[in-house]
Image (spheres, coloured by chain):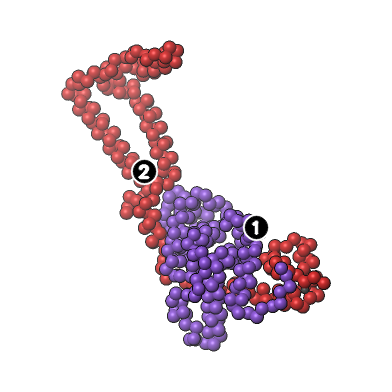
Chain colours: A purple, B red
Amino acid sequence: MDTLPDHDLILRARRGETEAFGELVHRTQTAVFNVCYRLLGERREAEDLAQETFLRAWERLHTFDVERPFLPWIRRVAANLCLNHLPARAPDFPELDDERDRANPESGPPQLVEGRQQTEQVRVALLSLPPRYRLALELRHFQELSYEEIAQTLNRPLSDVKSDLFRARKLLKSALGTPKSPDFGD
Amino acid sequence: MTHLSDDLLNEYLDEALARESRTAAESHLAACPDCSARLAELRALFADLGSLPDLPLEVDFAPLILARLEQNAPLPRPVRWLTVVQAIGAVLAAVLAWPLAETMLPAWNLPPLQNISSALANSLLQTVSDFRFPKLVFDLPSLNLDLPTTTLTVTILGVALLWLVANGLLLIPRSRRTS
Ligand SMILES: [Zn+2]
């Protein structure tokens, strides 16, 4: 089972073989969890939503085009599901649950410490954004969808998608504290 | 000279510009240090996002998902199709078995199949032609059974019941049968 390509596993799962679907879960669960974690910022909630994602995918497996890769599809299902669970506004003080303890930025060799601090900064900055901007960055940068694909996924006009994405980048830059450059555009 | 807008720089890095706009942007960038600096900043932001590592999982979802699927899995489609095919097969088998039943159960006075079919056809034609209920062309089988016939009937019914139960079990997916 663990040597079969995704394509075969999906066909088997469609015939009702839950073991085949289990193998697909195995292969994609870390990616799916990380979509939810980037969007929700809370481990337990992200775990719940990741599981919901797989149950939803099982129900909708017959709508999936087997000629296309499975991972991008399931990640989009996860993003769509999280969309309904995102609060309307960003929290005033974004919290990264207990990740600080797990990857203590003050321990280890200096280069590693710097790397972790950088990573943590990016996560905190992402979570400080209003959810719609977080979602735009998730779909463009982590799922690598085109503007058109994002518009299709979110069922929104292309112009909205672009303005959300560009605004999201601007907000993220200021949240990361990089010095502001003179603004010629807009 | 007009500087490149933020939107244009974004679209440039997203590789969303048409060929001509892209070439125009590139020649401006080559000549303008200000716009090049803004592009470099945006590029650094892309790199920050790109370097965010995946967190490792603390739980394996696969067994949890499978447990939940097996609790309330609906019969998958192919099995439902099998049921339909089987039902059609059963009707065919009953029609084919009719002459046998005739010879085995003489006490029941079963009419031959042609009579039934012609009776059905007659009834249909009559109903269509004069919109009245048709007369019954044949008598219902008598229920005055003698003992040997009854034993045979019980046996046949028993076998049929067993067949149904066994096939019904086969229709349940393996995963649900074992759990
Ligand atoms: Zn310029």
| Residue B89 vertical position relative to residue B77 in the rendered view, above or below | above
- The image quadrant that residue A164 belongs to is bottom right
Looking at the image, which residue is at 35% across and 53% down? B71
Q: Name the residue rendered at 44%, 80% in the picture.
A: A101
Q: Residues within 10 Å of mark 2 (few under 14, many from 20)?
A: some
In the depicted structure, whether residue B113 falls above or below residue B54: above
Give, as a three-letter code, the residue at label 1: Leu
Task: Please give the name of the residue rendered at 36% of the width and 18% of the height, measured from the top-left corner.
Answer: B116
Image position, residue B36 (x, y; %): 74, 75
User: Circle 2 sits on which residue?
Assistant: B171
In which chain is the residue bearing label 1? Answer: A
Alpha carbons under labels 2 and 1: distance apart: 48 Å
Measured as percent of width and height from the top left, residue A65 is found at 55, 51
Q: Is mark 1 within 8 Å of ligand 1?
A: no
Q: Residue at x 55, y 70 (%)?
A: A129
The spot of residue A4 in percent (x, y) is: 49, 58
Disc 1, SS? helix
Along the line of sight, the residue nearer the viewer: A32 or A45: A45
From the viewer's side, name the closer residue of B77 and B153: B77
Q: Quadrant of the N terminus of chain A?
A: bottom left
Nearer to the camera, A100 or A85 = A85
Write down the quadrant of residue B10 in the picture. bottom right
Residue A34 visible to the viewer: no
**Which mark lies nearer to you, 2 or 1?**
1
The residue singled out by tag 1 in the image is A158
Circle 2 chain: B
Q: Amino acid at mark 2?
A: Leu
Instruction: Place residue B41 in its image quadrant.
Output: bottom right
Residue B14 visible here:
yes
Q: How many marks?
A: 2
Dividing the image into four quarters, tell me where ligand 1 lies.
bottom right
Direction from residue A37 to residue A185 in the image, left or right: right
